[in-house]
Image (cartoon, rainbow, N blue to C red):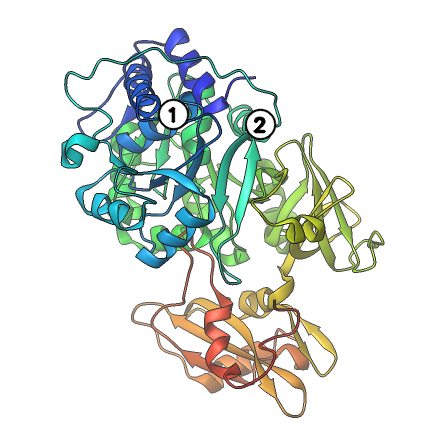
Amino acid sequence: MMHPYSHYPARAARLWPERIAVIDGDRQPTFAELDARASAAAAALIARGLESGERVAVIQFNCLEFVVAVIAIARAGGVLCPTLGVLTEAEHRYIVADSDARFVIALTPEHFERAKAVAPDTQAALGLGAFAGDANLLADGQAPGPIPEFDRPPQTLAQILYTSGTTGKPKGVTHSFASVSAAMNFWATTFGHRPDDRVLGQLPLSHFCARAMDSAWIGGAALVILRDATPATVLDAIARHRVNFMLGVPTFLRVLLDDPACESADLTSLRNIVYAAAPAAPTLVERAMKRFGAVLNTGFGQTEAYGLCTYMGPAEHAQALAEDPTRLTSVGREFGSAQVMIRTEDGRRCAPGEVGEICICAPWVTPGFWKNAELDAKRLQGGWLLTGDLGRMEADGYVYLADRKEDMIISGGYNVYPAEVEHALVEHQAVAECGAFAVPDDKWGEAVHASVVLRPGASASEAELLAFAKERLAHFKVPKAVHFVETLPKTPVGKTVRRVLREPYWAGHEQQVHGAG
């Protein structure tokens, strides 16, 4: 089997050589041009000594060169290790060291300096651009040498994706040729990418938005790259390039909807918006449906299983809005070739409506964690991925997320799921977003607190929000205190990091929160 990140761009170059592959401002290479550029970079990597199976880290920056780099690494027989550009030097150094990366590729002058600082040796920092000097993999006049054909078994390591680190140090999640190919084909076929389509790359291409980038190669769609994802740039890109497909996290949708320009923007080209990666409040989903139309899709996946394992499409969204708006908090039903089970701590399958851990069996599930046999044993059992996410499946098959296991609050013996508290508070017209978390409590063991971000120009008191919560939540779920903050701590892909919210309250305590590792 060929590496999917090499095979599918090459196939696109054969099938649609003259069609635009990437739109990065004024730069709009065809699939044939993209493929040739990637082959040149791959040949340069091989010439510099890259051996099959060695890891190559890329410091993400949304640009054409990122696309070239990820294809080139695959074509040269390497294992892709994408890293977010916004990480600190210490975080980049940790990932480079943990992955045993042979090379570190930068796409900007600033990141080239970072690459030189974290690379294993002075010859290991490379770049795609004149800023890299002799280390430029696309140096002018550089003739590509012969590229061996790396035909490998389907289980061969293709990528190591480092988690966002909501629970501490990032962990390396591996994916094989087979799991990468399965995920790419899931996204391309489920959302019907075709050669005239435009898919938006406004989020980091190293993470969630990689699903837009790589599935576009299968359908022949063009990737529209944005470097600065503001409401203005996104709305302009959708209208200007007639974007058909967009990924987003709920926070991004809220910011987009809150922008006055959204009301008059031309969004008629949109065929699918997929929101995922974090829970969405039903009021937000309803607002999005009213503005964007019948284009909303959601589902459940994660870095360890990056196809959607559950799914709820536009028709189900409309049905929920008309018949049962509470279903808008669902992530859909088991879908396609995925199998989903909710199980208890002792491995029993949960009854309908019973909260347990979401477990997945799917062709796009990780084959294992990088250099972490302990985590393999904990998270991969009997062919199932134990996701670490709590949820319930109702009798009709709809799955509802509760929370991460480590974020669950146990107050006076009762389980409290932060997402439920957050959903209740964001129903208040003054609340933009909220993060609920546990603090130590002498009487109850743990108590619920909430940090709240208000909408621009809005006001609300703590007493008002607590009274509002009491009308919607059982007494043991109501926060004992509300803190008003300007922003919530988030991962680069938009997940609220509750660990950061609770840390100050647990200083000096032996255990920070129930279940936290």
The crowd level at tag 2 (other Cα within 10 Å; few <14, some 14-19, many 20+) is some
Which residue sits at x=38%, y=13%?
147
Residue 24 shows in this picture: yes
> Which numbered marker is on residue 71?
1
Specify the quadrant that holds the N terminus: top right
User: Which amino acid type corresponds to the residue marked 1 in the rendered image?
Assistant: Ile
Secondary element under disc 1, as helix, strand or loop, is: helix
Please indicate whether residue 199 sits to the left or right of residue 135 in the image: right
Q: Nearer the viewer, mark 2 or mark 1?
A: 2
In the rendered view, would you say 64 is above or below 437? Answer: above
Specify the quadrant that holds the C terminus: bottom right
User: Which amino acid type corresponds to the residue marked 2 in the rendered image?
Assistant: Thr
Which one is earlier in the sequence, the residue at label 2 or at label 1? 1
What residue does disc 2 label?
156
Measured as percent of width and height from the top left, residue 446 is found at: 63, 82
Which residue sits at x=14%, y=20%?
140
Which residue sits at x=17%, y=43%?
109
In the rendered view, would you say 125 is above or below 286? Answer: above
Please indicate whether residue 207 sits to the left or right of residue 439 in the image: left
Measured as percent of width and height from the top left, residue 349 is found at: 83, 51
